[in-house]
Amino acid sequence: CDLCVTPTHSADEVCISFLAETRGFSTVMSKNPNCARAQTVSNPQQQRTRTRDLISLGCSNLPLSPRQRELCSRKSVLLPGIQEGARLGVAECQRQFRHERWNCSTNQQVPVFGSVMSAHSVTAGTKETAFIYAVMAAGLVHAVTRSCSQGNMTECGCDAGLRGGGSAAEGWHWGGCSDHIQYGTWFSRKFMDHTVKNMSTSRSSYTPSTMNQHNSEAGRQAINRTMSTDCRCHGVSGSCAVKTCWRTMAPFERVGTYLKDRYEHSVQVTERSKRKTKRKDQRRLHVDKHQLIFLNKSPNYCLEDRRRGIAGTRGRRCNRTSTGPDGCNLLCCGRGYNTHVVRHVQRCECKFVWCCYVHCRRCESMNDMHTCK
């Protein structure tokens, strides 16, 4: 994460990377093409002061709330984790919904937590909002925990709580570097959640704020529920007489698949402001902390509505033979579709020729592409 900004110097005067500073380098180089040269900072105190200023600017330039911006400045070494968590969450959201009417589209190429969530504030309370809060919270836990396990931060590391335990009778013991999700979960709560007193998952009514907080927590729990135990064998000739085991997070794609299933089985709850219109003897709804909840039914997402942040499905590519959500009938909302013939050119039948180059043929194919009207 290279930065090339300073409050009093031009871009070509100071080139600095706060990641390099945290590793103790005095000569700081940047990949930013706007930086004309690397600069050696001889005074360590001056270096730390400049780095703090740069990190403060990096946090202030992000679309965050004042509380998030302040935490970002205090926990400066976590700034790459914040950005990586946002990237993970958005990329997985778009992967899970790539074939559906709502495809988790965003207006920014490099989205962060504030802009992604505010972009859907008009349609707040829907199942899609629930998934966004869950996957973004999970992405932040995953990114920060991975950074801890890789030794990129001084505040956390591997989970040492499991070391030394195990079962001698069964021939295995805890060791290695177990992912320390407790720290990542703590930071995700501090960064994303607003403190809501007396929030209970057994209540039959929610506010939008408590709904978002519940779904964020469900996303964090998804990291814990998808963790696995990996082991390595030790013994003569690979006999596996003794195994060393550790706990590791699942790939984030698996976490996204888990949350997509939670989305499909999400539960509608009552908004607190509307509770007085319900009968007093209505059965209280119990909501598990692992479930996603929503307040309002989703729109159909068929037509573009810029005010509500809905892109619509016009121009979306569809599958003419599919009966699933990516099929032209469902994705195009009954409006029909256009068929285009697309020429695809690629290299084929490549062979190595001595010496030393690869010779390929140029192959062309004509394919039908269908897009919604």
Image (cartoon, rainbow, N blue to C red):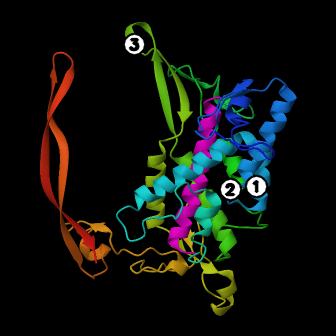
Q: Is residue 277 visible?
A: yes
User: Main SS type for the magenta part?
Assistant: helix
Residue furthest to the top: 236
Residue at the image position 63 percent from the left and 33 percent from the top: 30
Q: Position of residue 60 (x, y in %)?
A: 74, 54
Q: Nearer the viewer, residue 83 or 189?
A: 83
Q: What amino acid does circle 2 point to? A: Leu
Cα separation, mark 2 vs mark 3, equals 53 Å
Q: Residue at x 64, y 67 (%)?
A: 212
Q: CA distance from mark 3 to mark 1?
A: 53 Å
Pick whichever, 180 or 10, lies toward us.
Answer: 10
Quadrant of the rendered image containing residue 271: bottom right
Residue topped by disc 2: 62
**Percent of width and height locating residue 318:** 27, 67
| In the depicted structure, whether residue 18 falls above or below residue 164 | below
Q: What residue sits right under mark 3 in the picture?
A: 239
Q: Is residue 12 above or below residue 272?
A: above
Query: Is the residue under label 2 in contact with that under label 1 (CB below 8 Å)?
Result: yes
Instruction: Indicate which disc, 1 or 2, sits on the residue closer to the N terminus.
Output: 2
> In the structure shown, which secondary structural element does the residue marked by tag 2 occupy?
loop
Q: Residue beneath label 1, please?
A: 69
Q: Quadrant of the C terminus?
A: bottom left
- Segment colored magenta: 125-151
